[in-house]
Amino acid sequence: MTNNIIENVLNLLSSYSIETTTNVYAKYGTFSDLVPKINNVYVTYLPDDNMNKVTETAKKLTIEGYTVIPHLPARTIENKEQLERYIKVLSEECGCSKILVIGGGGKQAGEITSSIEILETDLLSKYNFKEVGLAGHPEGNPDIKQKDLDRAIIEKNNFSKKTDFKMYLATQFFFEAKSLKNWEIHLKSLNNNLEIHAGIPGPATLKTLLSYAHSCGIGNSIRFLSKQALNITKLATTRSPDKLIFDLANYQVENPETKLKKIHFYAFGGIKKTSDWLKTTNKPDLRYNNQKFE
């Protein structure tokens, strides 16, 4: 293994971000013993959440010393007045300067339907946001036609040329590096220039990962996991992302022009399990498949 791959693995692991829900944070009350302060923490805004829960969680994490990246799901917003109120509170009361703007799932609440509509309000600039993440779908989205996903990528890139904040693509989770590789080949045909933060699952049982893959309808990942699940004894076995991280680091070496810059953990097996794994893994003697990374 080349030194470049080792360096890339360690860089990816040192600059990762991680996601939490409002309920998970409420359960622990603090993340100080779980996540290093240098790592960004995303706060989801699920269909059964409300703005107050999200902003309160963001505020508490900021007070703890984290850089917080709250979700802003377009379809959850009832109107532009509510949108501005949410963005203003995140900026002025929660100390947030980064945000993830997504279409969002669930029933549409109001007149706003897409992330690009939120960008075009210029409210994020008005309230001094410096970095904006947008959704990326390496394996597509069962609820959105591919041509519409492509149009969204083009629109996001076009908008990035006329704004004063940094924009990047935060991806849906996947389980094989080739999903990102194939997607990035496609993105090049769309002239994408946005940085990519790859979403990967933290340690979790195969049964749990299959459940999340089915719920999100990501076909390639379902097929990949289903092959492993043919051996029913593996369903309860915890699957760690060692190989995926190594493969992504290797992909960076083989493709120096890649837009892949960071990884983002979806803690499907629990934030403590992901945190504990990172604490034992993120070190110079990192091992993959019981072989030292060297």
Image: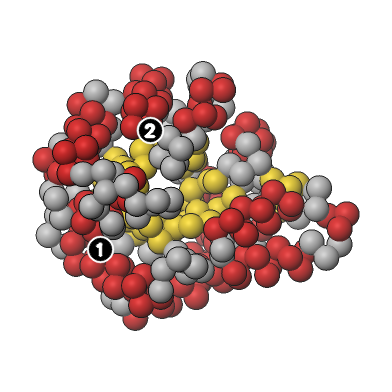
Query: Of 37 and 152, which appears nearest the observer?
Result: 152
Query: Of 30 and 33, which appears nearest the observer?
Result: 30
What kind of colouring is applied to the model shown?
secondary structure
Residue hosting label 2: 50
Check disc 1 and report its element: helix, strand or loop: helix
Q: Nearer the viewer, mark 2 or mark 1?
A: 2
Residue at the (40%, 61%) spot, across then down: 136
Check disc 2 and report its element: helix, strand or loop: loop
Quarter of the C terminus within the rendering: bottom right
Residue hosting label 1: 156
Q: Is residue 101 visible?
A: no
Query: Of 13 and 222, which appears nearest the observer?
Result: 222
Going from the N terminus, do you reach mark 2 or mark 1 first?
A: 2
Residue at the (34%, 52%) spot, across then down: 108
The amino acid type found where label 1 is placed reads Lys
Residue at the (26%, 31%) spot, across then down: 90
Q: Residue 82: image x %, image y %?
A: 21, 37
Using the image, determine if residue 2 lies above or below residue 97: below
Quarter of the N terminus within the rendering: bottom right
Q: Is residue 278 left or right of residue 159?
A: right
Query: Of 28 and 86, which appears nearest the observer?
Result: 86
Task: Please identify the quarter of the rendering in which residue 40 is found.
Answer: top left
Task: Please identify the quarter of the rendering in which residue 204 is found.
Answer: top right
Cβ atoms at labels 2 and 1 below 8 Å apart: no
Using the image, determine if residue 175 lies above or below residue 271: below
Using the image, determine if residue 94 lies above or below residue 222: above
